[in-house]
Image (cartoon, rainbow, N blue to C red):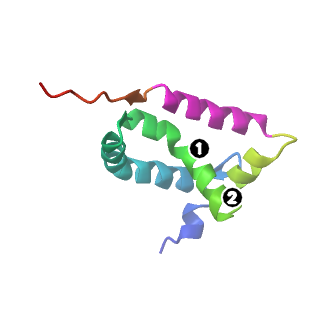
Amino acid sequence: MINISFLRSFRIEGFAIFDFATAFLGMLILSPLLRWLFRKIGLEIPIRSWFFFTLPIGILTHILIGRKTPMTVDFLDPSGHYVVKVIILGLFILGLTGIKRIKKQQEK
């Protein structure tokens, strides 16, 4: 029987592939709901942007709950891991490029 430890044993540069897959799968499931919620407050955020926001949101969430994951530790390390920092900030900027404000239509 396959357990979670086995699934998390496959890694790229110390990061578990399973964690990335579940994060992006979770965003695939949640993005239509998130898109609908943000439309209610006047922002149009395409699903593509939600995928770009997946890793930055994950890091922010782990920081807020106090969970130290390898990527969170690398991102917060002031003396190195610049590739991780550039990738996360780049994904955040790419996510911002698709956001538009929805103008409310005036009634005639």
Q: Is residue 55 above or below residue 96?
A: below
Name the residue: 63% across, 50% down.
59
The residue tagged 2 is 69
Calculate the distance from the C-alpha at mark 1 to the C-alpha at mark 2: 13 Å
Residue 87 seen from this side: yes
User: Helix or strand or loop: what does disc 1 sit on?
Assistant: helix
Magenta span covers which residues?
A: 81-97
Looking at the image, which residue is at 51% across and 45% down? Answer: 54
Residue 82 vs residue 11, the one in the foreground:
82
Query: Magenta stretch: dominant SS?
Result: helix
Circles 1, 2 touching at the beta carbon (< 8 Å): no
| Image location (x, y in percent) of residue 63 | 67, 56
Residue holding disc 1: 56
Amino acid type for the residue under numbered disc 1: Pro
Residue drawn at point x = 84 percent, y = 40 percent: 80
- Give the quarter of the image for residue 107: top left
Q: Residue furthest front?
A: 108
Packing grade of label 2 (10 A; few <14, some 14-19, many >=20) is few
